[in-house]
Amino acid sequence: MALANPGLVTPEIIRKYAQDGVVYIPQALSSTWLNLIETGIKRNLLNPGPYSTTFFDGEPGAFYGDWCNYENILEYRRLLADSPVADIVAAVLQTKNLWLYYDQIFIKEGGYCRRTPWHQDTSYWVASGKQLGSMWITLNAITKEESLECVAGSHRGPMYNSSAFDSADESKPIYNSDVRPRLPSIEDERDKWNIVSWAIEPGDVLILHPGVLHGGGAIANGRARRTLSMRFFGDDAVYVKPPGVPAPPYWGISERLKPGDALRDPYFPQIRAAR
Ligand SMILES: O=C(O)CCC(=O)C(=O)O
């Protein structure tokens, strides 16, 4: 039996998640939790972590990212302990236990910010399974075009050599290896793909399987987007050794786990436990 279902997660959402790898849940988080996230992001921006980065440096707006700051940002820890975030994700994934993979922020502001390139998170990860999911929480009201876009069902398709976020070639592979196929040029042939996206009001969330092909809309000059993506895995997740250094590097994990082992490691705090 999965953890307590917080009510918003209907059988249709669970079915849709398995089928499409992405679901939209309107008004999942109250203003209390949105305020906490806003404060957490502010604290995170004042205290950048070792992986903080500006994507596409030198372009008009600041497209800033940071990740793996759970231990240092009190508000992220409180959010996972006390808000409905973890219970909602556990109910969607249908898992008894839930672990944090990592937290990540995407900030687009201060001028035109280009699209987040199409990519597939599992290609960077050391995790595989059906019970994987990220809650994508955006604090600003944004249009469907500015929102996250996903190719429905692509988590059930091939695993690609994901994007290196190179400004000159957005599908340039991250790994110097041809074990996985190169990403398709989704943006150049959008009508061939089943692309879904939703306009977001504060409180609405998306949950996406990290194997889904996804990318974020551009943000025009004068607009802004602050997003927190909380990434989790459940009972069925196993360790995968990628064909290069994973991101983040998870030092020593390949000595502690072998491919196919249940993904349990001190890097991943357990957020919910079966009662
Ligand atoms: O918000 C974005 O633009 C990208 C988000 C993303 O790639 C993710 O949450 O996995």
Image: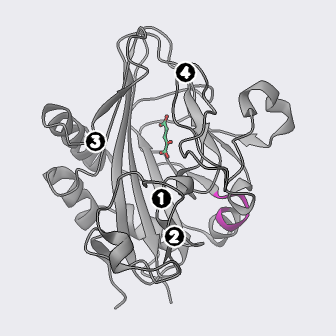
- Callout 3: few (<14), some (14-19), or many (20+) C-alpha neighbours within 10 Å? few
Question: Residue 206, position in %: x, y?
Answer: 53, 49
**Most foreground residue, 66 or 111:** 66
Q: Can residue 8 be seen in this view?
A: no
Q: Distance between the residues labelled 3 and 4?
A: 23 Å
Q: Which amino acid does label 1 sit on?
A: Trp
Q: Distance between the residues labelled 3 and 2?
A: 22 Å
**Most foreground residue, 245 or 211:** 245
Q: Is residue 70 above or below residue 254?
A: above
Provide the residue designation for mark 1: 125
Verify CB contact (< 8 Å) between mark 1 and mark 3.
no
Q: Which amino acid does label 4 sit on?
A: Ala
Q: Which amino acid does label 2 sit on?
A: Val
Q: Nearer the viewer, mark 4 or mark 1?
A: 1
Provide the residue designation for mark 3: 51
Residue stretch in magenta? 17-21
Q: Which amino acid does label 3 sit on?
A: Tyr
Verify CB contact (< 8 Å) between mark 4 and mark 1.
no
Rendered residue at 57%/27% (across/down): 217
Provide the residue designation for mark 2: 240
Verify CB contact (< 8 Å) between mark 3 and mark 4.
no
- The secondary structure that most of the magenta stretch takes on is helix
